[in-house]
Image (tube, rainbow, N blue to C red):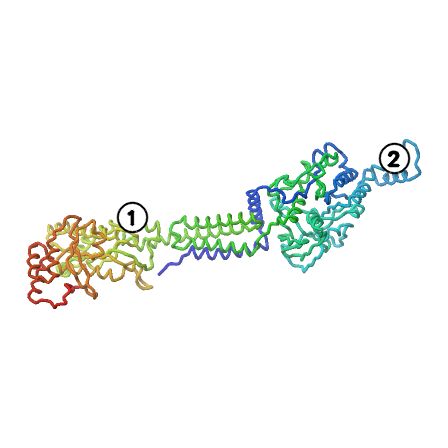
Amino acid sequence: MRQRNVPFITAIIATVLAAGLAVWNSTRALPLLASIEGFTVDARFRMRGPRKPATDRIVIVGLDDATRKETATLQSRRGYATLIDAISAYRPKLIALDVFFSPAEQFLSREVTEQVRAVTASPPTNTPERAVLERVAEEIRGDELLAEAIAKSGRVVLAAYVIPGVPDPEPVEPPGLERARHGEVADAGGGGQLRPQSGAGVIASLPMLTAAQLGAGLVNTLRDEDGVTRHMPLDVEYGGRHYMPLGLAVALIEQGTPGKTRYVVGGSTLTAGRTRLPLSADASLLLDPLGKKQIEHISAYDVLTGTVPREKLEGKLVFVGQTFAASDKVATPLDQAADGIELHATLAENILTGRILRSTGTLATVGAVLLLGLVVAAAQLRRIRRRAWVPPLVSLAAITAYCALSLALFASGTVIAVASPVLLTLGVLVIATVSGLATEGREKAHLRGVFSQYVSRSVVDRILENPSRAKLGGERKNLTVLFSDIRGFSHVAERMQPEELASFLHEYLTPMTDLVLASGGMLDKYIGDAIMAIWGAPVDSPHHATQACDVALRMQDALVELNRKWVLAGKAPVAIGIGINTGAMAVGNMGSEARFEYTVLGDAVNQGARLEALTKEYGVGILVGEATAQAAGDRFLFRELDLVRVKGRATAIPVFELVGRAGTSDPTFARALALYRNREFTEARRVFATLPDDPAAAVMASRCDDLAATPPPSDWDGVYDQRSK
């Protein structure tokens, strides 16, 4: 009865459970798996390395350390107005400001500010005090100057920020924020993890500033649990309205389709102009970061001083933000301290150049888990699981190939999940391995119980080292079988008491069995005084015929020693006959569901038994079949005795006597046998008679007498029909 492959079954069950966990993770986003997945994405970015922008139209003007050191103007709205004027002088396509101008600039208290404005609005005087007040009034006009600069430029896109939190029950949309709304939006209330984040309020610039803006966009970002920013939200909800990020707003203006988006809330895509963008959790897009300072950075100080070549900014999309060392730093897969403005510039670059990373989604992830899990399960099949290290090696090779595939696909912009398939597959492997270890002991104990009584300890150890060597189900193999029997055992047994007979058999069978086991053979069974042994199974041996012949000669030698001891003890000596045959046999567990044994079956086995019986008719010790003589011929001396039609067979077979070890043979018997087959019975009888101490020659000589007296028919084929069985 074939045992169940417990590790295989366990691996299949674990694979199904792993696939279910992958589905659950796609809806719940387990924090640990999400963090590890983020790490694998970062690793792919790092292996790819930084890349150059696919367009030179995006530039970052940074409020860097040099700007802060050399000028104080950017500490006020007047300073930003000056910067906008300076950038506008280079005639860029647009200017996107990652800066909020809210609330109103306030150098003095509100009361003093109103008083200064009232005084300077009255008819002018030439007093020193009036001159000072007019200078103060000019200094506190920062908001008005900035609004004038924005209006004069006509290229400015202002930022806003939706504050995360519980939505305001009575939300108010700040003036100008409508310019950041998505174009066409439908919301059916679904979407789960794909739904955008919502906010409790908005930080936006003053209405007097937004009134003159070209466009608007949010500067909200998303940070994963490990603090790395990998995604940018393409939509944030506030007060039932949906707003786009700054980078997307800039890209749409550049494409000539400002605000033209179509979005179904909770859907997996968002259409922006002519581009369909894939969405992941929180309605975000996986960024394709370029790397540290890959987008050209220009110091705001150089712009203010006019030292920047015109072609650096003319016609460009200019993103303005803080780049000094201690402000607005974010971690990205390629830069642990990237400037925040780079995220918005990168989003615009990705959209405008089509460098969009697309994730394969839940179905592909579950498919990967199933595929890898099935590889692990397949590695548990007995024909593969020949060594304990083979299943882990096959499984790890499959995981390695999957990781290599993830790198190849990543290079083309496709992101497949790695953490879930790999970790869940490793889980399946661990479960299957533990199951295998748990059942291996029982399997080895079973194998030891099956074979320990039939083969030597060293062979048992080889079987336990590689159980696949011993198939417990039937299989066809080329083997050698040996049968030995004590001549006239019935008469021997009649002269002994049962206890004496048992002792005699023990004394005889022990050395004979030891010879079989020591040679690597398998004791198949005892049949009374008879021994049946096999070579070539359960462990393969290319020299099974040679091993059997060697053991047969050693059995005859051992019997000489036993007879010498028995004669000294007053017992009669005995003789044994041995038959050996080689051929195709069915080997394995044979029997019923209730009881079975490991043995061999087949015509070649039956021939071996018939050869043993023939030894009595020819008076020789060892007879072998033709295949055995051919396979072991180089090591031993054989002579052909006759063509015999054994019991139960219609066709004749040549039988050979195993004479001894390799050496020079006497050709006399062969010459006589040739005369016999040529119907020259008288001459054949004369030649056989020249071998007086040869029992087989005596048998053949007697047969020649009979055939000479009664000649056989003309179609006689020289075949002898076996009489005994």
Q: CA distance from mark 2 to mark 1?
A: 109 Å
User: Are there few (<14), some (14-19), or many (20+) residues within 10 Å of tag 2?
Assistant: some
Dividing the picture into quadrants, the one containing residue 83 is top right
Can see residue 485? yes
Q: Nearer the viewer, mark 2 or mark 1?
A: 2
x and y, in percent, of residue 324 in the image: 69, 36
Tell whether 127 sits left or right of 437: right
Tell whether 154 sits left or right of 395: right
Residue at 72% x, 47% y: name it: 161
Instruction: Please tell me the numbered disc located at residue 133.
Output: 2
x and y, in percent, of residue 157 in the image: 74, 46
Residue at 53% x, 47% y: name it: 407
Q: Amino acid at mark 1?
A: Ser
Q: Nearer the viewer, residue 82 or 123?
A: 82
Give the vertical position of 499 relative to 44 (above or below).
below
Q: Quadrant of the C terminus?
A: bottom left
Residue extending furthest toward the bottom: 713
User: Are there few (<14), some (14-19), or many (20+) residues within 10 Å of tag 1?
Assistant: few
Dividing the picture into quadrants, the one containing residue 609 is bottom left
Residue at 29% x, 48% y: name it: 458
- First in sequence, mark 2 or 1: give its number: 2
Tell whether 311 sits left or right of 48: right
Q: Nearer the viewer, residue 8 or 677?
A: 677
User: Helix, strand or loop at disc 2?
Assistant: helix
User: Helix, strand or loop at disc 1?
Assistant: helix
Q: Quadrant of the N terminus?
A: bottom left
> What residue did someone put label 1 on?
458
Q: Amino acid at mark 2?
A: Leu
Mark 2 near mark 1, Cβ–Cβ under 8 Å? no
Q: Nearer the viewer, residue 284 or 461?
A: 284
x and y, in percent, of residue 674 in the image: 12, 58
